[in-house]
Each structure stands twice: as structure tokens, then as C-alpha cells.
């Protein structure tokens, strides 16, 4: 990866260069995403050494999307659990305040 003029990042994926302009302040996110994709491509290539080109790219992207969906499900479960804890705490506090009155 290298930086071109006008804050355009040039990212090389599977031997192809892509010039991508990230919004101000998001340049590192773009570079991190490119590194993540490259890592996913390498992992997919290790598992399926005969895959090349678009098929490799699509399978790696599908694996990343699958991981994202799993993280979203996990996040929702954790959020629901925290909401239950907060609700239970609020209920205990409300009862404590009500018994003092």
C-alpha cells in the first residue's frame, strides 16, 4: 500500500491496484480494511489452494460477511443481557426508594 497525491490511497489486492479516496479522518480505517481483506484472502487461499481470482475474492468476502453477521448476533445478545441487568437494577432501586417513603 502506498499513498498517492490528494490523499488517495492505492491498495493492491490480488495483484490489482485500486485507488480509493477515503473521507477525511478515515484513511486508517481504509488501510485497516485492506489489511483485513488481505489476511482473509491469505487464510482462504491456505484452505482452498486451487482457488484463484474472483472465486478466491468472493469466498474471502463471504467469510468476512459471515463473521460480521456472527459478531452482530453476539453484540445483540450481549446488549439484551446488559439491558436485562439494567432493568433489574432499576427495579431494585425503585423498590428500595419506594420502601423508604
Image: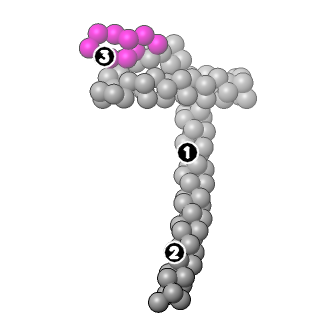
- Of tags 2 and 3, the one toward the viewer is 2
Picture coordinates of residue 61, whole percent (x, y): 55, 35
The residue most toward the left is 6
State the separation of the CA atoms marked 1 and 3.
Answer: 28 Å
Q: 16 or 26, which is in the foreground?
A: 26
Q: Sequence order check: which comes first, mark 1 or mark 3?
A: 3
SS at circle 2: helix
Location of residue 54 by image quarter: top right
Query: Do the residues under discs 1 and 3 have CB atoms within 8 angstroms?
Result: no
Q: Which residue in the protein does label 1 denote?
A: 68
Name the residue located 60 percent from the left edge and 50 percent from the top edge. Answer: 70
- The magenta stretch is 1-10
Q: Is residue 62 above or below residue 42?
A: below
The residue most toward the front is 100
Apparent side of residue 74 relative to residue 25 in the rendered image (left or right): right
Apparent side of residue 54 relative to residue 22 in the rendered image (left or right): right
Q: Which residue in the protein does label 3 denote?
A: 7
SS at circle 3: helix
- Of tags 2 and 1, the one toward the viewer is 2
Amino acid at each position: 500500500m502506498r499513498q498517492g497525491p490528494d490523499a488517495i490511497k492505492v491498495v493492491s489486492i490480488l495483484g490489482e491496484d485500486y485507488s480509493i479516496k477515503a473521507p477525511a479522518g478515515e484513511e486508517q480505517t481504509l488501510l485497516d480494511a485492506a489489511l483485513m481483506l488481505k489476511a482473509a484472502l491469505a487464510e482462504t487461499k491456505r484452505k482452498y489452494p486451487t482457488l484463484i481470482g474472483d472465486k478466491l475474492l468472493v469466498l474471502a468476502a463471504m467469510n468476512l460477511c459471515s463473521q460480521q453477521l456472527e459478531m452482530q448476533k453476539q453484540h445483540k445478545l450481549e446488549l439484551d443481557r446488559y439491558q436485562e441487568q439494567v432493568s433489574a437494577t432499576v427495579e431494585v432501586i425503585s423498590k428500595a426508594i419506594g420502601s423508604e417513603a
